[in-house]
Image (cartoon, coloured by chain):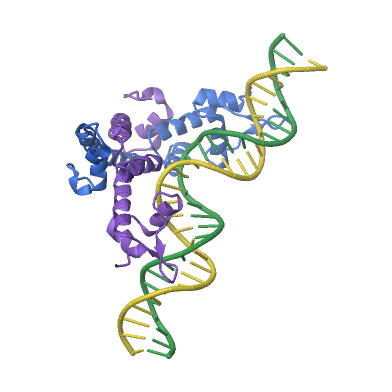
Chain colours: A purple, B blue, C green, D yellow
Amino acid sequence: MKKITIGEAARRSGVKVPTVRYYESIGLLAAPSRSEGNQRSFEPADISRLTFIRHARELGFEIEAIRTLLTLQDDPHQSCASADAIAKARLVEVEQRIRSLMALKAELETMVEGCGHGRVDQCRVIEVLADHGRCTHPHH
Amino acid sequence: MKKITIGEAARRSGVKVPTVRYYESIGLLAAPSRSEGNQRSFEPADISRLTFIRHARELGFEIEAIRTLLTLQDDPHQSCASADAIAKARLVEVEQRIRSLMALKAELETMVEGCGHGRVDQCRVIEVLADHGRCTHPHH
DNA sequence: TCTTGCACCTCTAGTCGCTAGAGGATGTAG
DNA sequence: CTACATCCTCTAGCGACTAGAGGTGCAAGA
């Protein structure tokens, strides 16, 4: 039975060491057993859990959503309707965010293109910010 | 000389009352004069500044970037190279964020589509999160 | 055996950009 | 004069970490 230190767990899961401790502190990860010298000793299952969490975070799921997904994973006989709903909600969020960012992109492009690289009083960047009415792409 | 209260300033600029006070506290907005009863009294110029800030925030500029943009606006004889650089940097950020979100969207769609609405042990949502190797769209 | 030096421990405080709430003062309309 | 909205200051909280202080554990080389 090999002992996995927190550094090793971090390296294998891709989650940083302080973040592993943080996840333990908020109860997302069960407190692992300790060595004689009070150092954490993780199991392979903990690495899987940390990897799951990291991946979910990369997909932009919030901690509370991940908490729910983890309880679903812990009990595989449940219906996956909750997991489905969480993923769908996240998808809607992402789609909205993309739309919003596309509008911003268009507006920023107009600003940057219009900049004559002269002085501030002719600068389109400043001008557009100062006077919202000049936005060519209304989005908010 | 009409006195503009903080509520009025908030209404006209679209910045919330506590946020106006917050901007003053971090020095983004000069402290306005006060009434006899110690209430803030804003000038029309303050409303313009608040509107500028709000618009920049909506475009996702960070407070420190806005601070720089405001000092540029305050001195219109400067070169607008800084403003241009800030806007360009923001544009690059936005473009990267969009690309990243598009990848997430694709992955979420696969997850949601693959969900057979059965039990968790057949759920693609949980499965993909647990095993990153099954991502169809590698992005990280 | 000693020592070097890294990895580990706990705890607190800071990040960003607000937002919420307590507890009290002011201003205005009826 | 009395409601009542709005204002004031101050502190604490949000999410998801991150940084740092100050101390302990552990493995390897001299």
Which of the pair A75/A90 is nearer the observer? Answer: A75
Which of the pair A66/B7 is nearer the observer? Answer: A66
Q: Residue at x 65, y 33 (%)?
A: B33
Residue at the extreme left: B136
Identify whether A110 is placed above or below D17: above
Report x, y in % for residue B93. 31, 42
Instruction: Indicate left or right for B100 with A36 as reference.
Output: left
Instruction: Indicate left or right for C25 with B75 as reference.
Output: right
Inspect this view and state whether residue B113 appears. Answer: yes
Report x, y in % for residue A68. 37, 40
Q: What is the total number of numbered labels drawn onto the structure image? A: 0
Report x, y in % for residue C28. 69, 17
Q: Quadrant of the N terminus of chain A?
A: bottom left
Q: Residue at x 31, y 49 (%)?
A: A54
Q: Quadrant of residue D12?
A: top right
Which of the pair C15/A45 is nearer the observer? Answer: A45
Q: Residue at x 42, y 54 (%)?
A: A24
Instruction: Indicate left or right for C23 with B128 as reference.
Output: right
Report x, y in % for residue B86. 36, 42
Instruction: Indicate left or right for B112 with B6 as reference.
Output: left
Q: Quadrant of residue A99?
A: top left
Inspect this view and state whether residue A104 appears. Answer: no
Q: Quadrant of residue A115?
A: top left
Q: Quadrant of the C terminus of chain A?
A: top left
Which of the pair A74/A109 is nearer the observer? Answer: A74
